[in-house]
Amino acid sequence: MAKITIQNLPDREINVHDFSQSALAQFGFNHLDWMHACGGKGRCTTCRFKVIEGIKNIAPLTKAEERYREQGLLQLNERLACQSIVLDDIVISVPDDCKLPHLNYSE
């Protein structure tokens, strides 16, 4: 089983049980609210996260992510939660502009 550690949500850990589902779906399965203005369809960047460790443990970029990279809206260390399939352990953080106001972030 893979694990997603969210560094700026007091080291919250999410267990990945289904390797065919996106990180956003994994957050939902674990009752964690996550910003996603377009409903998780890869049409915005509000669900993005920064990868601190383990970027190679995420499936390759999707076409939506490639498009946002080309537009300069997705940095090399960022992925979209709605598009990313986590294959093994990763450590991530939530960028300031993607934080939800009702959650307590450590930074």
Image (tube, helix red, strand yellow):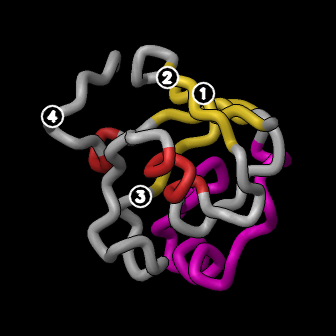
**CA gap, disc 2 and disc 1:** 6 Å
Q: Earlier in the sequence, mark 4 or mark 3?
A: 3
Contact, mark 4 vs mark 3 (Cβ under 8 Å):
no
Contact, mark 2 vs mark 1 (Cβ under 8 Å):
yes
Residue 44 pos. (x, y %): 38, 74
Residue labelled with disc 3? 47
In the picture, measured across the screen, residue 25 lies left or right of residue 62, that is: left
Residue labelled with disc 1? 5
Q: Quadrant of residue 40?
A: bottom left
**CA gap, disc 1 and disc 4:** 19 Å
Quadrant for the N terminus in the image: top right
Residue labelled with disc 4? 102
Q: Nearer the viewer, residue 95 or 72?
A: 95
Contact, mark 2 vs mark 4 (Cβ under 8 Å):
no
In the picture, measured across the screen, residue 57 lies left or right of residue 36, that is: right
Are there few (<14), some (14-19), or many (20+) residues within 10 Å of tag 1? Answer: many
The amino acid marked with disc number 2 is Arg
Contact, mark 3 vs mark 1 (Cβ under 8 Å):
no
Contact, mark 2 vs mark 3 (Cβ under 8 Å):
no
**CA gap, disc 3 and disc 1:** 16 Å
**CA gap, disc 4 and disc 3:** 16 Å
The amino acid marked with disc number 4 is His
In the displayed structure, would residue 100 be above or below residue 105? below
Residue labelled with disc 2? 12
Start-end of magenta stretch: 55-80
Q: Nearer the viewer, residue 55 or 10?
A: 10
Query: Of helix, strand and loop, which one carries label 4?
Result: loop
Residue 23 pos. (x, y %): 58, 54
Q: Which residue is depicted at the point 46% across and 55% down?
A: 48
